Amino acid sequence: MAADTVTPLLTWGQFTRGAFKDLVRSITDPLTQNEWLIEATRLCEEHTDRRLAPFTGVVETHRADGIDPDEYMDSGAMPLDLAGSLGRNWAASFGSTAMIRRMHLAEYATRYPDMWQYSDVSIDVVRSYGGDEVLTTAKLLMGPQPDTGFVWFQLGQFIPAASVLQCTYGGGYQTVPASLTRAGKYMLASLAVTELDPLGQNHGHDPDMLRSMAEEILTPYVR
């Protein structure tokens, strides 16, 4: 079984620069340190039900349904580039001209979108009656937008209603907000106390209180 790998929300150096240095003075193995950092990061993500740390290769499946009534769908007289014209003609040949034009990715920055970045976005359109086509960012009119996950497809892309959209992409906070680093510290301290000093006899830390403090900081990030 492959090990979980992620870029943690904080480094071991950040964790040990403060009051928790004495708590983990006996943890000198780099592998153990990294495992604890990953566990703390995953616990933060699980509490918020969001990806926070940088990630790659996430796959989501969406069903394309619903067309915005404000969208301009009667595009018969609208001049398009070659790709748009071919897409529109292809749709018309199947008797379908009202194509899906928008969707939202599940992962986006609920706070500090300026620190978030998407990468390697591709969307495989599996049409309801067969056939598929992979769309890259070159075929997107806009998006994905870091603050909403909004994706807007170019006019002429052949995406009939009820198609399945299989999205593969990377993203996450490339610069970790300080609040998330602090939440990671408290979450990691809670893990350490639970394992090293569960009764609080040696270090005086309450693991439940530490975890509660982490979760309070994470509240604005909860889905």
Image (cartoon, grey):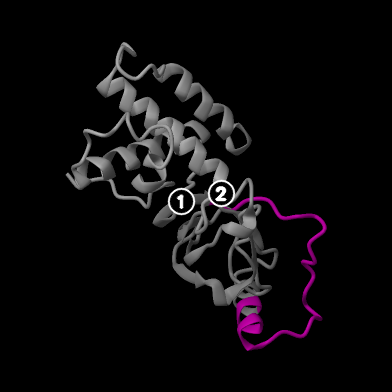
Q: Quadrant of residue 179?
A: top right
Q: Which mark is residue 94?
A: none
**Which amino acid does the dot numbered 2 rest on?**
Pro
- Label 2: element kind: loop
Q: Which quadrant of the rendered structure holds the N terminus?
A: top left
Taking the spot 45% from the left edge, 50% from the top edge, the residue there is 53
Mark 1, Cα crowd under 10 Å, few <14 / some 14-19 / many 20+, is: some
**Figure check: 68 above or below 217:** below
Left or right, 215 with reference to 196 = right
Residue 137 x, y percent position in the rendering: 55, 72
Q: Is residue 99 magenta?
A: no
Q: Quadrant of residue 116?
A: bottom right
Residue 195 x, y percent position in the rendering: 26, 23
Q: 188 or 60, which lies in front?
A: 188
Q: Which mark is residue 60?
A: 1
Q: 193 or 130, which lies in front?
A: 193
Q: 208 or 90, which lies in front?
A: 208
Q: Main secondary structure of the magenta part?
A: loop
**Figure check: 153 above or below 66:** below
Taking the spot 72% from the left edge, 84% from the top edge, the residue there is 80
> Which stretch is magenta?
63-88
- Label 1: element kind: strand
Q: Which mark is residue 177?
A: 2
Mark 2 and 1 residues: CB-CB less than 8 Å, in contact? Answer: no
Earlier along the polypeptide chain: callout 2 or callout 1?
1
